Image: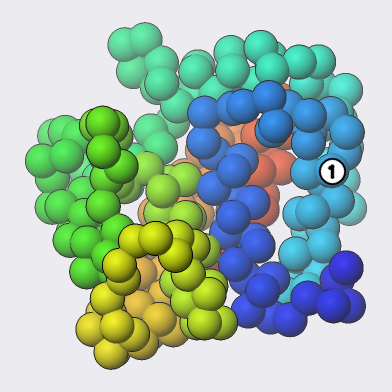
Amino acid sequence: MVDDMNGGEARAAAWELAAFSFRYPTEELAEAVTSGEWTDAAREVAEALGLELPESFGAGDAESVQDLKALRVEATRLFVGSPQPAVSPYEGVWRAQEEGVQALLFVNPHSMAVERFMKSCGLARPEGTNEPLDHIATECELLEHLALRSLGIALDDESPLPASADLPGGSPQAAYEAFLAEHVAVWAPGFAAAVAAETRLPFYRDAAELLKVLTA
């Protein structure tokens, strides 16, 4: 599979996998982790992109995730919390904390900038949801979307999308590079390091490692 995957395809697949890893866990994710499929996919995209993962990558993932409940318990502790998550998955909250200012969902300059950027790419919050768009998984999905558009592929053929010339920077590639540089690469490495330090499951440590090498 690696030999057949070009750089653009591998880049899109890597961000898809990262988004999949940091969304609230589903049965599909639990099965991918316990079967070893998730680890294999991560190694394949990393190899295709010329990125190095640690030799220990994937060790203990399947054994530590007995079922979906194990993943959801840890994801809730890490990213939802009560009253606060151990590691905020939102760019605006994360960067506000780093800057020493009050961290509020939605109404902060970083979250609003992400929302404006996504809207300029023809993407918006799904109807009926109230999730801030600066969640790490959603930001990874935007990079996947832009990587696919660079290949001439749209994620959702039913939704009207702006012409490439109307995207930030005037092309999917320019928009991809701008969003990565201005948003994801700014905060995701610190987020990944915090997840790796805080988690009790090897899987989330490896998911953080994948995110780290993608944003290095």
Please tell me in which quadrant of the rendered image residue 82 appears.
top left
SS at circle 1: helix
Q: Is residue 187 left or right of residue 76?
A: left
User: Circle 1 is placed at which residue position?
Assistant: 37
Q: Is residue 202 left or right of residue 138?
A: right
Q: Is residue 61 visible?
A: yes
Q: Out of 211 and 41, give the one closest to the viewer.
A: 41
In the image, residue 8 lies at what x, y percent?
63, 79
Indicate the colouring scheme. Answer: rainbow
Q: Is residue 110 visible?
A: no
Q: Out of 99 and 34, give the one closest to the viewer.
A: 34
Q: Is residue 115 left or right of residue 94?
A: left
Report the quarter where the C terminus lies: bottom right
Q: Out of 25 and 156, give the one closest to the viewer.
A: 156
Which residue appears farthest toward the front when viewing the image? 158
The residue lying at 69 percent from left, 71 percent from top is 10
Report the quarter where the N terminus lies: bottom right
The residue lying at 73 percent from left, 27 percent from top is 30
Please tell me in which quadrant of the rendered image residue 113 appears.
bottom left
> Hey, what amino acid is under mark 1?
Glu
Vertical relation: 43 (above or below) 94: below
Vertical relation: 154 (above or below) 70: below
Label 1 crowd bin: few (<14), some (14–19), many (20+), radius 10 Å? some
Please tell me in which quadrant of the rendered image residue 164 appears.
bottom left
Vertical relation: 23 (above or below) 213: above
In the image, residue 88 lies at what x, y percent?
38, 33
In the image, residue 44 lies at what x, y percent?
82, 62
Counting every numbered tag in the picture gives 1
In the image, residue 207 lies at what x, y percent?
66, 43
